Image: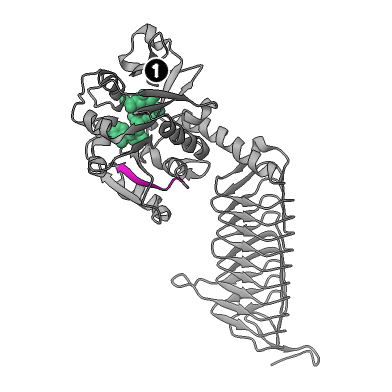
Amino acid sequence: MADLLSIILAAGKGTRMKSDKIKVLHPVAGKAIIKHVLNTLDGLNSKIVNVIGHQKEEVQSELEDLNKWDLNYVIQAEQLGTGHAVKQAESFFADYEGPVLILYGDTPLLRKETIAEFVKEHKQSNSDLTVMTAIFDDPEGYGRIVKDEAGNLTAIVEEKDADSETRQIREINSGVNCIDSALLRDFMANMNNNNAQQEYYLTDIIEFAVTRNKKINTYTVEDSDEIIGINTRKQQAEAEKILRGRIADRHLANGVTIIDPDTTYIDAEVEIAKDVTIYPFNYLEGKTKIAQNTTINPNCKLKDAVIGENVEILSNTIIKESKVGAGTNVGPFAYLRPGSTVEANCKIGDFVELKKTTVKNGAKVPHLCYAGDAEIGERTNIGAGTIFANYDGENKFKTEIGSDVFIGSDSILIAPLKIGDKAKTAAGSVVTKDINSGDTVMGVPARIYNPKSKQEN
Ligand code: UD1
Ligand code: CA
């Protein structure tokens, strides 16, 4: 049984973002805004209802990996306001007695500790309604918290409905509320859209609760950054900066050296072990993982990369959806495209591009090479300028190279191709046929060559 019912409002388009993509799917620190919001519910044992509308399939697929939670969806076909959005979830609180936590899907900076404390305080104070607020130097755009002389919350007034005096108020509504289910049901039956935007405002519940003599509380968050709502690209960029600062602080506290946190861009879900050193101008994205003692030199971009211990990634390297084993060196100017695995103690040097290629333990591709759809055996050396010609204009083919092979500089290996262990190709060979273990080939196209008799056959 869940301890709580949470409703997340995410049906709106987010017109002010001026985007084809709805607002809550935009990323902050590499993670969709809505996902940040949902992550604040981790550990609360809550039943969750997401109110979705625009691009609803995309929202559902973005949240797919949270399906292990008690995650539910309701559709708000027309966006008639935050109160109307909550109403779409009514079937979930029709028979439920207890607090309903309502969050807006556009506040990615909330901390889960804050949400947990907020819910706890709502329960402990036996309130019917608790509103999370913050004090902003610039409250523009937010609903203002109106209190009476005794300091009791009496209303939330939206910017567009506020007179100039009300606009001076710097305490704002975060959009995070805890509301007793009985009060919420009662309000749902009584709300209206008599306001500047002709919307059903959830915030009208305050004045309604006052008329019903309900116990109303505010909870002012210490760090006002937490409740920045994203309505515009500018706010998205601000949130990005704040979140990146927090992420860098977390890694620094865990023993990672980040030479310049201001120019290091680490996504929310990246994992970095201690004694890793990260030079400036790096982008560590997606679900990248970096093991202990590894160094990332300036100007690299790693996306969904898994990097082992004691690795050195030299400057200007891009690694996407690929793995690099312990003790390996990569770069400068290397490009590991999706599906590549470089095992331990290898060298992938400058201007090397790998695509769907496995480089086994101890192998070297030190410079100037394209390898696609290939397997390169242990301790094999690929000479400079080697091209794995994997594509005939219609189909892609594989190249398999055994262990301890020597590929001479500027070889062209035309797939499909198998090269046996300890084989050799002379510089400039164009290899069109499989090579048996131990054989050496040369020429264009390559013929078998006997180095002892210096004869071709
Ligand atoms: C809202 C609050 C405001 C508060 C601010 C905090 C109201 C009326 N105003 O204003 O007091 O200071 O958030 O960030 O509640 N949504 C729906 N369906 C709708 C309308 C909105 O699902 O019909 C969703 C949006 O997708 C969004 C969230 O609710 O995620 C908030 O809506 P938004 O339009 O951004 O409200 P604000 O104008 O920011
Ligand atoms: Ca908003």
> Which quarter of the figure is the C terminus placed in?
bottom right
Depth check, front residue: 202 or 347: 202
Q: Residue at x 72, y 59 (%)?
A: 311
Residue 388 at x, y = what percent? 60, 71
Q: Residue furthest right?
A: 452
Depth check, front residue: 36 or 128: 128
Depth check, front residue: 48 or 439: 48
- Please give the range of residues in magenta: 44-51
Ligand 2's quadrant? top left
User: Is residue 12 something one can see in this rendering?
Assistant: no
The residue tagged 1 is 145
Q: Residue at x 46, y 36 (%)?
A: 115
**Quarter-of-image position of residue 22:** top left
How is the model colour-coded? Answer: one colour
Q: Residue at x 31, y 24 (%)?
A: 203
Amino acid on which disc 1 is placed:
Ile
Q: Which secondary structure dominates the residues rendered in magenta?
A: strand
Height in image: 20 above or below 211? below
